[in-house]
Amino acid sequence: MPAPDYALLLDPPAFPADRYAVLADRLAALMGTKNDVLLIQAEAVLALEAAATSLARPGLRALNIVTSPYGAWFGGWLERGGATVRNLTASPAKPISLQEVERALDDGTGFNLLAIVHAESASGILNPLPAIAALAKDRGIVTVVDAVASIGGHAFEADRLGIDLAVIGPQKALAGPAGVSAISVSPKAWELLSHGAAPENSMLSLLDQKKLWLDTGRGALPGTPAPLEFFALEAALDRIEVEGLASANQRHKRAAAAARAGIKALGITTWVEETHASALVSTAILPDTVEAGAFLSAASRQEGADISGGVGPGAERLIRLNHTGRRANPDAVKANIAAVSSALKSLGHATDTDSALEAAEKSYSEASKGAL
């Protein structure tokens, strides 16, 4: 097979200005919102930083839930802008509990912002967002949600949950480009964003986006958009809309169940209880006799494998099996299971690859019967 001619991607035509608003509306439908949707011309981490920087000001009181480095960064960005932040940190690489959040809200005074990550690709956990969002809504607190690893892999309906500001990126479950992201903003969130200390003339300014794009009728995006990113986003939305969001969620759920069945059949302990586990990655604990670096090096040599180490405190001995986006399919799941087995064998740990693959196949088969 000849190597791709990447020169063909040079000097692409401009993305049609009249299709930006259409993209925003299609993303809004996926997010389950009628709120404004902003298109951010950068990877989702910048969108998260823009949200925090635009919100931050002296007098803002935020409860920031930390279940990975991303949550810690968000709290740091808020503090940088003068906000008073209480970081509610979960046990290492574990989800936060509803009871912990409720106690923090009861103990604190006058929180007007709550920030949380929904699904954590760093550790494979899933925070109990619906219940936490309900708590915040009942108390009149604006909610900010990092839903980058949610859309297309987990049910996420911003308006039904009462989410005021949500950040998404298409590079995860939607299997789209990494260089563009989106933010949904409710009227209540716009009120909190409209303050004298808000940044202006900045890539981190959401008010600039409002002034230069929303208020001018959602025509041409400000700045110089990267057309390839938007053509790729359009293609990713075409694909997910044909499949259907509910079907994509179920595809990720089936892949996760099969991956975990295979891991367990290898005698490896999964990290997260199923009710608190993300459908995008499966995390497991390496045996004490296996060195993490050696394992990852051996696993990476196996064809079709996509396995990485955990990220952040408490995740140092975790491995992550990726079944996100286009990898949420039986072949990719089985390739990861075979790679785990092969890597463990090469490091002197006895495994039964055939039994593990059979366990994954059985999981898929049972899921298919249940869908009939």
Image (spheres, grey):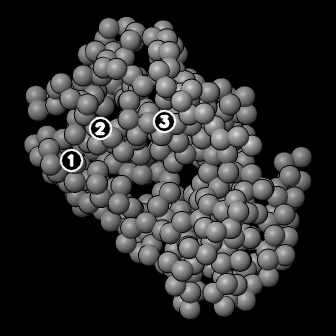
Q: Name the spot of residue 139 as percent of width and height, x first.
A: 32, 44
- Near mark 1 (Cα within 10 A), the count class, few <14, some 14-19 or many ≥20, is many
Q: Residue at x 56, y 34 (%)?
A: 6
Amino acid at pointer 2: Ala
Choose the circle earlier in sequence order: 3 or 2: 2
Judging depth in this view, the residue of 265 and 14 nearest the camera is: 14
Q: Nearer the viewer, mark 3 or mark 1?
A: 1
- Label 3 or label 2, whichever lies nearer to me, is 2
- Label 3 to label 2: alpha-carbon separation: 16 Å
**Residue 212: percent from left, percent from top:** 28, 15
Residue in front for this viewpoint, 226 or 281: 226
Check disc 3 and give the amino acid type. Answer: Ala
Residue depicted at x 86% and y 52%? 368
Q: Give the spatial CA distance, label 2 vs label 1.
A: 9 Å
Q: Secondary structure at mark 1?
A: helix
| Residue beneath disc 3 | 158
Query: In the figure, 6 relative to 329: above or below?
Result: above
In depth, the one of 173 and 301 nearer the eye is 301
Q: Which residue is mark 1?
A: 78
Task: Count the numbered circles shown.
Answer: 3
* Element type where label 3 sits in the image: helix
Q: Nearer the viewer, residue 114 or 237?
A: 237
Residue on which disc 2 sits: 51
Q: Pointer 2: residues within 10 angstroms few (<14), some, or many (20+)?
A: many
Reply above or below: 187 against 180.
Answer: above
**Measured from the top left, where is residue 133 in percent x and y?**
43, 46
Upstream in sequence: badge 2 or badge 1: 2
In the image, residue 214 sits, relative to residue 170, either above or below, namely above
- The picture quadrant where one finds residue 164 is top left
Q: Residue at x 44, y 76 (%)?
A: 316
